[in-house]
């Protein structure tokens, strides 16, 4: 306890020195606590996320590389996550929960299930995170703050128009095998499929569902998981149903590569089956040059991911959210048809130019 007595002389000087040092120490401690709190808040503000469907698909590998490069440039701390397989909604839910807990400012996601993930997306947005969807729009699309994607319907339509134009009169009697993505038919799946149908001249029934068509030219729809082994298995199944197949539509280029292996094993790698796809990765464009794939619609994952990182950083600084392409519900990152056998009336570039723009 402090006494109420008076101090004299040197005792008073000593006491003033002690109290002065105590006040300095208190100020230093308070300043350190404030700095620590600010550093923690600043660190949390720097966290951004990228969640893809899977780890190994070249499209998602390149998307991750694009996000990493842009995040580093902007000084952001990027956390990346991926599902165990295409359709793995549970892993994506867990990833979003982790980002919310980490205090992230936002994240970009390629949803495996465009409907099932919506409640968790809402939870993240309610917590103040900016949510940007890449490649595969949510259902409904406005469940996210923004969507950066290829116009997947247009990408499908381009290869459908090209296939129809290439076949000419034979298009009316074509036999078409559809190598689709997944049984739950996420948006990217049905949009590409239905886009191809429109381009080829097949009557679309429910625009958000495939498999309900009445067109006799359709051999069937089989799921590939967007993977090469899935593409081979799917095409083997369809060849049993439809040995006279003349067109093979594929959800992406890995599925196309697998489907082609099935055609080759069946002795149908002689050009009698027209193969079309979507992606525009370097291996796929090389397959176009080699004649394995007739045409592919190229999309741009690096652009999607980089734009997402920029948008989240801007949101963290200003609160401003990105806007869609005028006349659309999403920002269109573009799609370009690549083929060495152009069709009149269908805009395209050749594989030489496609290889300059490709990824993976």
Image (cartoon, rainbow, N blue to C red):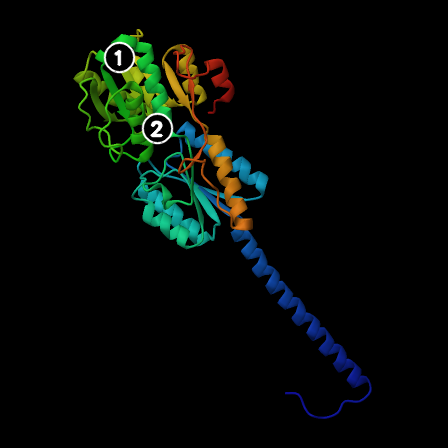
Instruction: Please state, as top left, top right, bottom left or bottom right, where the N terminus lies in the image.
Output: bottom right
Q: Which residue position holds label 2?
A: 153
**Residue 76 location (% of width, % of height):** 55, 44
Residue farthest right in this picture: 9
Please count the marks in the image. 2
Counting residues from the N terminus, which is met first, the one under dot 1 or under dot 2?
2
Sort mark 1 into few (<14), some (14-19) or many (20+) by Cα contacts within 10 Å.
Answer: some
Q: Is residue 39 left or right of residue 339?
A: right
- Place residue 24 in its image quadrant: bottom right
Mark yes or no: residue 340 visible.
yes
Answer few, some or many: residues within 10 Å of disc 2's Cα (few below 14, many 20 plus, some between 14 and 19): many
Can residue 233 be seen from the camera position used here?
A: no
Is residue 311 found left or right of 51 in the rendered image?
right
Residue 119, x across and y down, in percent: 32, 49
Residue at image position (62%, 68%) is 30
- Height in image: 242 above or below 333? above
């Amino acid at each position: 306890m402090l006494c109420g007595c008076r101090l004299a002389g040197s005792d008073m000087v000593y006491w003033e020195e002690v109290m002065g040092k105590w006040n300095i120490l208190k100020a230093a401690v308070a300043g350190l606590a404030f700095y620590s709190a600010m550093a923690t808040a600043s660190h949390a503000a720097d966290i951004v996320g990228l969640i893809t469907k899977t780890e190994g698909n070249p499209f998602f590998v390149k998307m991750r590389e694009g996000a990493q490069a842009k995040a580093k440039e902007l000084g952001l701390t990027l956390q990346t996550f991926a599902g165990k397989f295409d359709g793995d909604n549970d892993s994506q839910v867990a990833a979003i929960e982790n980002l919310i807990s980490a205090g992230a400012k936002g994240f970009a996601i390629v949803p495996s299930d465009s409907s099932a993930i919506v409640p968790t997306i809402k939870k993240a947005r309610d917590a103040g995170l900016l949510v940007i969807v890449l490649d595969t729009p949510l259902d409904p699309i406005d469940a996210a703050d923004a969507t950066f994607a290829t116009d997947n319907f247009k990408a499908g339509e381009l290869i459908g128009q090209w296939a129809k134009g290439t076949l000419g009169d034979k298009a009316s009697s074509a036999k078409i095998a559809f190598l689709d993505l997944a049984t739950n038919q996420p948006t990217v799946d049905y949009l590409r499929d239905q886009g191809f149908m429109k381009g080829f001249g097949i009557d679309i029934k429910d625009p958000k569902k495939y498999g309900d068509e009445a067109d006799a030219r359709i051999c069937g729809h089989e799921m590939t998981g967007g993977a090469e082994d899935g593409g081979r298995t799917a095409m083997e199944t369809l060849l049993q149903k439809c040995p006279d197949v003349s067109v093979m539509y594929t959800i992406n280029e890995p599925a196309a590569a697998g489907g082609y292996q099935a055609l080759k094993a069946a002795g149908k790698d002689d050009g009698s089956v027209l193969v079309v796809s979507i992606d525009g990765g370097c291996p796929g464009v090389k397959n176009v040059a080699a004649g394995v794939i007739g045409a592919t619609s190229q999309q741009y994952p690096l652009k999607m991911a980089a734009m997402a990182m920029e948008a989240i950083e801007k949101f963290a600084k200003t609160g401003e959210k990105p806007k869609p392409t005028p006349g659309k519900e999403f920002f269109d990152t573009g799609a370009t048809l690549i083929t060495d056998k152009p069709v009149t009336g269908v805009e395209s570039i050749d594989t030489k130019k496609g290889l300059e723009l490709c990824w993976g």
